[in-house]
Amino acid sequence: MSAYVEAGYGVVTAALVGYGAVVSVRARKLRAEPLVVRVDDSRPLEEGPRD
Amino acid sequence: MKSDRAVQGLGLVAVLAIVATYILGLWITPPAAVMGNLVRLLYIHPPVAWVAYLAYGVTSVASILYLWKRTRDPRWDLIAASSAEIGVVFTALTLLTGSIWGRPTWGVWWTWDARLTTTALLFLLYVGYLALRRATPDVTQRSKRSAVAALIAFIDVPIVHQSVVWWKTLHQSATVFNASLSPKVHGEMAWTLLLGFIAFSLAYVWMLIRRYQIAVLISKRQEILLQGALDERMSTV
């Protein structure tokens, strides 16, 4: 088998497995992660103009 | 849950089809009379290029549906973006596998041949599309601008396909989707190539569903976070 053929199949396999894994894991993580609204309350709110 | 199992099943079928393509392409099919073993790259290079076309086609249709007021829905925009991202991955693979084939066949990794140049341009156009999406923070504006950009970028797809007909190029003419629609491969080589087209198309559909799910989750998350921040702000005023 030519080294070029092995390289071609290798590149395609690596990209498909890599992209597939990233997409799959990310989707699973987003679904499992609870949504928490984080508000920075360490800084006091500036008072706006009052009528 | 049922639909998620169906998606998992689709992913499994895609993997099995790709493995079957690899087995047939690497070990079962014979070497070609002229190309020798390099013909084995033919079982992956055209299918990968086809998926890139398919992905950009889906992006274009989704963009039109978003731009058309009667069918406007943010989901079309998310489908367009998801498909474009996959298209970029497959265009990169088209360029890489083509380059790997070109080195022993033409003696160079790269040449400014019409097919190669227009494909490289296609890659850059859709990388630009993805960059544009990141550069525009307003959701509605981003969706409209990127839909227009996707349609402009798609003009290059038929140019890429016809480049081997319109110009005298080093790249060979279309093996399957040629003007007379008569494939230049036969027997087990043709079946293996056909399986390659099906296998990579299935992989694309699986990737698109997963990538779209991510896009929907991120979009919902951003909406909830924005609403939460607004509620918090309103309660303190």
Image (tube, coloured by chain):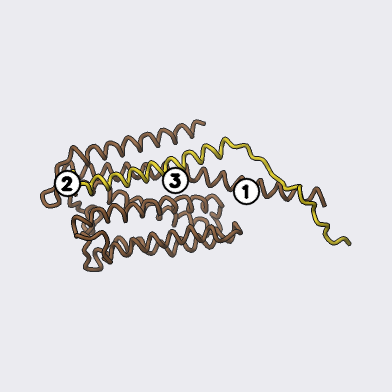
Chain colours: A yellow, B brown
Instruction: Using the image, determine if residue B205 lies above or below residue B74.
Output: above
Label 2 is found on which chain of the structure? B
Image quadrant of residue B117?
Answer: bottom left
- Say the numbered circle drawn on residue B222: 1
Depth order, front residue of A11/B146: A11
Kind of element beneath mark 1: helix
* Crowd class of label 2 (few under 14; some 14 to 19; many from 20; radius 10 Å): many
In the picture of the structure, the residue carrying the numbered disc 2 is B37
Q: Are marks 3 and 1 in contact (CB under 8 Å)?
A: no
Residue B43 horizontal/vertical position (percent): 24, 46
Specify the subunit that label 3 lies on. B
As rendered, which of B21 and B185 lies closer to the eye? B21
Of label 3 and label 1, which has the lower sequence position?
A: 3
Nearest to the eye among marks 3 and 1: give it: 1
Look at label 1 and name its amino acid: Gln
Report the residue marked by disc 3. Answer: B208
Q: Position of residue B59 (x, y in %)?
A: 44, 54
Q: Residue furthest left?
A: B33
Place of residue A9 in the rendered image (x, y in percent of width and height, measured from the top left): 28, 45
